[in-house]
Image (cartoon, rainbow, N blue to C red):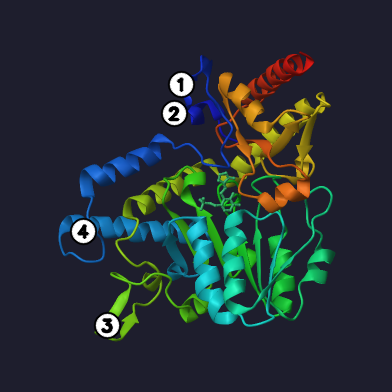
């Protein structure tokens, strides 16, 4: 295990007061904070070797290229991809999922083919598939949710058929914290001739991911949720699938030959990285991965499990707080809740007045909100630098919110 106080020293942003209280940052599922190691990696790139990549013979250009391509190696080993060219840098999870839906989906789906999703997906794993379904005549099917917000493999078996071409599912729910059995779902998908796409936005930052072990066909994640910068993420795809896909964006950097009427593309991974790539972002992502690996993802996962267990235990005393999703031992460090009769935006506003940052809203998961039969929820999400005293501050602030709204409603 690591020393969480030492870890906190590495995150300058955490050491401030917000509204007269020490900041308690519990909005990590939206984005995480950045350690000095990552901030310094970005600074040293911009101060010392900022240059475009893959082109010049000059020294700064070579250093930038080494940084950028080295980052690809770092991501490859982080998720244990078999080949480095299976790692495509993208703007983030959203872009990666759009690339799959567009480049793979449109080329491989026809009338009546099925795309299987779950109702707990983030909008970025629903809308691209809706668009692809409209363009190809494919149909969307949803694996139903159990009352605790999990899925059962027998429902997966019943939903996936021989007409299913694509199964796309989040690894960990950004709302309920549900951990989906994506390996087992992938086995069922493959047995029916479908591919398995995993949205790893909420898993890669928090647990060890091995794409060969999961045997998924595509895996997407974002750097900003794992101590890295915004504007970069990665798409992993099995080489044989990426090779048969058309590029998603066309222009500089991704071409081989260009004529007036016809052009050809570079080999993987470059055919998917049109334009000047996200150089600083990739360098920042690699620094974030180094940082996470030094702490150990198993330790990060265990730390967050401890926090969510403690938070759920403390909330058990409060019968007027509804917590959604599976039991503490079966979920990631995400806790979505409502105080009965109080709008979650009001809850989040009172929490903010106590220095506690949580998210309120639909969390880009409107179909899941419909399933929960509420329009919005509040959400506390933990990361490697949160502490038990953050949980205490959160619960104390909730009590303040309850008292405040109890008084308001009593008037
Ligand atoms: N998939 C999941 C499961 C997510 O949680 C998110 C972002 C995305 C995809 C999209 O990632 P992006 O980096 O491309 O934006 N989730 C959230 C959230 O829960 N609150 O703010 C963003």
Secondary element at tag 1: loop
Where disc 3 sits, the SS reads strand
Query: Mark number for residue 61?
Result: 4
Q: Which residue is mark 1?
A: 16
SS label for mark 2: helix
Q: Position of residue 13 (x, y in %)?
A: 44, 28
Taking 84 as reference, is 364 left or right?
right
Which numbered disc, 2 or 3, marks the residue that appears first in the sequence? 2
What residue appears at the point 55 percent right and 69 percent down from the top-left corner? 101
Residue named by callout 3: 257
- The image shows a total of numbered marks equal to 4
* Label 1, residues with CA under 10 Å away: few <14, some 14-19, many ≥20: few
Q: Earlier in the sequence, mark 3 or mark 1?
A: 1
Give the CA distance from mark 4 to mark 2: 32 Å
Q: Are marks 3 and 4 in contact (CB under 8 Å)?
A: no
**Are the two marked residues, 2 and 3, in contact with CB atoms closer than 8 angstroms?**
no
The reply to whether the C-beta atoms of the residues labelled 1 and 2 are less than 8 Å apart is yes
Residue 13 numbered mark, or none: 2
Which of the 4 image quadrants contains residue 339? top right
Mark sitting earlier along the chain (3/4): 4
Quarter holding the C terminus? Answer: top right
Q: Is residue 131 above or below residue 292?
A: below
Between the C-alphas of marks 3 and 4, the distance is 23 Å
The answer to whether residue 237 of the structure is visible from this angle is no
Give residue 324's position: percent from left, percent from top.
Answer: 76, 40
Who comes first in sequence, dot 4 or dot 2?
Answer: 2
């Amino acid at each position: 295990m690591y020393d969480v106080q030492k870890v906190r020293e590495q995150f300058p942003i955490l050491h401030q007061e917000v509204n007269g209280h020490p900041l308690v940052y519990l909005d990590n599922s939206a984005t995480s904070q950045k350690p000095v190691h990552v901030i310094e990696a970005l600074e040293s790139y911009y101060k010392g070797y900022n240059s475009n990549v893959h082109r010049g013979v000059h020294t700064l250009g070579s250093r930038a290229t080494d940084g950028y391509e080295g980052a690809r190696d770092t991501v490859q080993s982080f998720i244990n991809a078999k080949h480095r060219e299976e790692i495509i840098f993208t703007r983030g999870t959203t872009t990666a999922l759009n690339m799959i839906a567009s480049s793979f989906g449109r080329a491989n789906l026809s009338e009546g083919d099925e795309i299987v999703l779950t109702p707990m997906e983030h909008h970025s794993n629903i809308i691209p598939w809706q668009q692809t379904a409209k363009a190809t005549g494919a149909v969307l099917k949803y694996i139903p949710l159990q009352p605790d917000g999990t899925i059962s493999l027998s429902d997966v078996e019943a939903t996936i058929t021989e007409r299913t071409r694509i199964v796309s599912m989040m690894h960990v729910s950004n709302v309920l914290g549900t951990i989906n059995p994506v390996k087992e779902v992938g086995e069922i998908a493959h047995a029916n001739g479908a591919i398995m796409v995993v949205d790893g936005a909420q898993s890669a930052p928090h647990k060890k991911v091995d794409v060969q072990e999961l045997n998924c066909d595509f895996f997407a994640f974002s750097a900003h949720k794992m101590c890295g910068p915004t504007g970069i993420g990665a798409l992993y795809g099995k080489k044989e699938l990426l090779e048969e896909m058309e590029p998603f964006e066309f222009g500089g950097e991704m071409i081989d030959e260009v004529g007036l009427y016809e052009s050809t593309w570079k080999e993987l991974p470059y055919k998917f990285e049109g334009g000047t790539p996200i150089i600083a972002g990739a360098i920042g992502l690699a620094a974030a991965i180094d940082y996470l690996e030094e702490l150990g993802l198993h330790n990060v996962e265990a730390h967050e499990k401890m926090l969510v267990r403690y938070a759920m235990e403390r909330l058990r005393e409060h019968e007027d707080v509804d917590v959604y999703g599976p039991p503490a031992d079966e979920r990631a460090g995400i806790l979505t809740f409502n105080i009965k009769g109080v709008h979650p935006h009001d809850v989040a506003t009172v929490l903010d007045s106590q220095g506690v940052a949580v998210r309120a809203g639909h969390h880009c998961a409107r179909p899941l909100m419909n399933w929960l039969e509420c329009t919005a929820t509040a959400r506390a999400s933990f990361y490697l630098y949160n502490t038990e005293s953050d949980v205490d501050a959160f619960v104390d602030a909730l009590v303040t919110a309850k008292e405040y709204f109890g008084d308001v409603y009593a008037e």
